[in-house]
Image (cartoon, grey):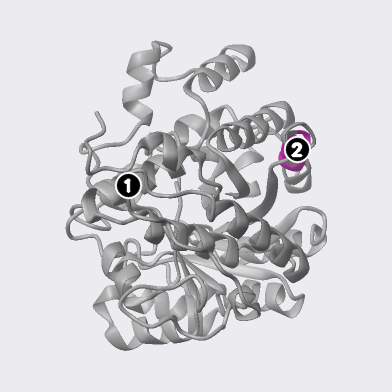
Amino acid sequence: MTTPAELPYDLLHRLPKTDLHCHLDGSLRIDTVLDLAKKQGVKLPTFDRGALTSLLVQGEHTTSLDDYLRAFDITLSVMQTEEALERSAYELAVDAHEENVRYLEVRYSPLLHIREGLRPAQVVEAVLRGLRTAKRELGIRYGVILCAIRSLGPESSLRIAELCVAFKNRGVVGFDLAGSEVNNPAKLHRQAFQLVIDNNINCTAHAGESFGPDSVHQAIHKCGAHRIGHGTRLVESGDLLNYVNDHRIALEVCPSSNVQTRAATSWETHPVDFYVDYGLRVTINTDNRLMSNTTVTKELQLCHQHYGWSLQTIKEIIIAGFKSAFMPYREKADLLAEIARELSTYTDPRGEMAGRVGLVESDLSTSGPLPTPPKPKLTAS
């Protein structure tokens, strides 16, 4: 029940939002997993909905990122056909739209969906079809990020980079390096990143989630990542943290997932509140809507509950999400102006005025001037 001192969930639900770090294979609906398994003849550990939910939805029983990732074996088993991929992508966009996510970046690795004979290009096309249908019906904007997997080796990463180049301007907006960081350093995948960068394509990397700040250092300085996925352990290096802040490198923070994978031991020890207070460009995302049983709205509500974020702070984080999107500048500028106007109509029902959301040209730059700590301002980030 909402207390008088707490922002209503409905208000957070109505705010326009982004989700920049969302894995397709971690965001299926439970009923879709069951339905696809029955249609495809895939044997699941259980066909009982409640029991399957307990296997897929992660919580306090996970002990590490590797433990968290085991649930993906189940979802991936039913995502090996074009029909399943198209449906999964469409439903994810619908679910995001229902909580007023205006821009969604969906990421996945095509190489994890070729067990039954699909070609990687067919996988990409199927996902794009589902997202195009959702955009046509609902108006939600989207981009696709193709993930290389650290443990599959540099050669497979180069193959994903080649796919990014082939599908540039056809819905694919970025390249990502995902998977367990331990014993899988990002620098081994430099050739793939270089190919992407040489073709003027955006890139991000999972870093600082299950390994220390050196992982973030490699992602930025060895691979040229434009954003950092998670970055939970960036806090351990003040010098690198300041570099990330100075260069406005966005962090794709997924708080619930970080607590579940033990990247952070608790909400209280998660560094996201410090990151926001210090002025880093923080975006709040879901990671895996199914495994983490979450939405962007829920993540914002949990941050509000744990850290006391005001409506103004939440608006600033939302704006940071739109600023950090892998979108063309002109399109981003138009969308930011639209979102800023809409956000300015919301006021805090507890009596605190939300404040005017203003944009200047520097707001649209990924390397614009630094906001003055401790709190970032919408007009200077």
Residue at image coords 25%, 47%:
305
184 to 191, vertically: above or below:
above
Q: Secondary structure at mark 1?
A: helix
Q: Amino acid at mark 2?
A: Ala
How packed mark 1 is, by other alpha carbons closer than 10 Å (few <14, some 14-19, many 20 or more), is many
Q: Which residues are magenta?
A: 126-133
Q: Position of residue 53 (x, y in %)?
A: 37, 22
Residue 355 seen by the camera: yes
**Res. 256 mark:** 1
Amino acid type of the residue tagged 1 in the rendering: Ser
- To which residue does mark 2 refer? 126
With respect to residue 211, does 314 lie above or below? Answer: above
Q: Nearer the viewer, residue 233 or 345?
A: 345
Front-lying residue, 4 or 265: 4
Which of 307 and 76 lies nearest the eye of the viewer? Answer: 307
Could you tell me which secondary element the residue under label 2 belongs to? Answer: helix
Q: Quadrant of residue 131?
A: top right
Residue 63 located left or right of residue 342: left
Residue 185: x percent and y percent? 43, 72
Q: CA distance from mark 1 to mark 2?
A: 29 Å
Residue at x 33% of width, y 17% of height = 51
Q: Nearer the viewer, residue 106 or 78?
A: 106
Which label's residue is closer to the chain start, 1 or 2? 2
Q: Residues within 10 Å of mark 2 (few under 14, many from 20)?
A: many
The prevailing secondary structure element of the residues shown in magenta is helix
195 within the magenta span: no
Taking the image as shown, residue 226 lies to the left or right of residue 305, namely: right
* Quadrant hosting residue 277: bottom left
